Image: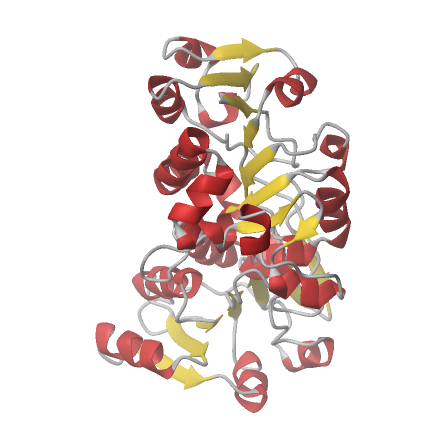
Amino acid sequence: MKIGVPTEIKKHEYRVGLAPEFAAAYVAAGHDVYIQKGAGEGSSYPDELYTAVGCKILPTAEEIYATADMIIKVKEPLEPEYALMREGQIFYTYFHLAADKALTKAVLDKKIVAIAYETIRDRNGALPALKPMSEIAGRLSVQEGAKYLERPFGGRGILLGGVTGVLPANVLVLGGAGVVGRNAVAMAVGMHANVTAVDVNLDALTELDKLYEGRVNTVYSTDHAVKELISKADLVIGAALIPGAATPQLIRREHLPLMKKGAVIVDVAIDQGGTCQSSHVTYHDNPVFEEEGVIHYCVGNMPGAVPVTSTAALNNATLANGLSIANKGYKEALKANPGLKEGLNAAYGKLTCKPVADLYDMVYTDSDEVING
């Protein structure tokens, strides 16, 4: 199979779909791998590292898309890339269709095969391709939140961990029992903040309570609890997730006046619509905005800021399934792996992700109908 890796064009996205050592695995399996010139530079991979393992360098995205049977990316295709997509072409990347109706329509109109990292499951029902990026985003969320609590950045001017004789900041993690949430909790605890984790999963909250031996406050998520807790919070991490679906908006606009002036919301879930109703996507060069005196940090590709770490972590999680698709073709690969089959969001103009179909009131087609047809 011909594998194409284009340069990511999302603003301030520095990751690349394949690092050289992982591209080498496709070459070793007998596939032709084409890398767009300079695609790996943001992750510190010059073209020479790719050619050294047998990849071919093509100068433009147009040539990559025209040549490849399968496109391996990091982020969803953006509007300038829609015209380059070809019917039947396999896309193996994050899509987050529930946050972008225009992209969903483009995927269906162009009749590509969309295999989304974020809905692939492993044997235990976990989300293996989402996990490493969620770990990174969870850790970064506290790091960035602590920075924007500083007065020069518009925040309250509070040190997350406090100091001898002075109380630490209050950190509220919404969706604290998920992967993003657990990593945010770990970072905040490590920085000696006063941490509260909110979730609807009581078993997971119990695990957090045991793990931190009572150092983390655990609260069952209700509207009343959220309203009460955000009024005390200095930093709120939005980490709630429903796989493949829009994120529940736990903080509504009318809640913002309840919050402290200069408090910070880091909405990690923004790529699925956001945990906060007032959130909208921002970018690394201008990551925050203020509404009702509350700082909102809503960067949709947080792991892109640390591409050396995040490219390697993503490739670790996606290589095995990617090779299976390339070696067997997508239909046979999906038939052989029920968890990978859950990654199929659309194919040949048919929408196979039910949460997205329900959200946009579109026709849903069972994935079995597509792969067995």
- Tell me if I can see residue 272 in this picture: yes
Relative vertical location of residue 204 with respect to residue 305 in this rendering, above or below: below
Viewer-proximal residue among 202 and 32: 32
Residue at image coords 53%, 18%:
35
Q: Position of residue 255 (x, y in %)?
A: 67, 80
Q: Position of residue 36 (x, y in %)?
A: 57, 17
Does residue 189 appear left or right of residue 86 in this picture? Answer: left
Viewer-proximal residue among 56 and 155: 56
Residue at the extreme front: 373
Residue at the extreme bottom: 224
Relative vertical location of residue 301 with respect to residue 238 in this rendering, above or below: above
Relative vertical location of residue 253 with respect to residue 273 in this rendering, above or below: below
Residue at image coords 61%, 72%:
248
- Tell me if I can see residue 139 in this picture: no
Relative vertical location of residue 229 with respect to residue 342 in this rendering, above or below: below
Does residue 83 appear left or right of residue 51 in this picture? Answer: right
Q: Position of residue 239 (x, y in %)?
A: 50, 65
Viewer-proximal residue among 364 and 64: 364
* Figure quadrant of residue 270: bottom right
Q: Position of residue 344 (x, y in %)?
A: 55, 49
Color scheme of the displayed model: secondary structure
Residue at image coords 34%, 79%:
205
What count of labels does the image hold?
A: 0
* Figure quadrant of residue 62: top right
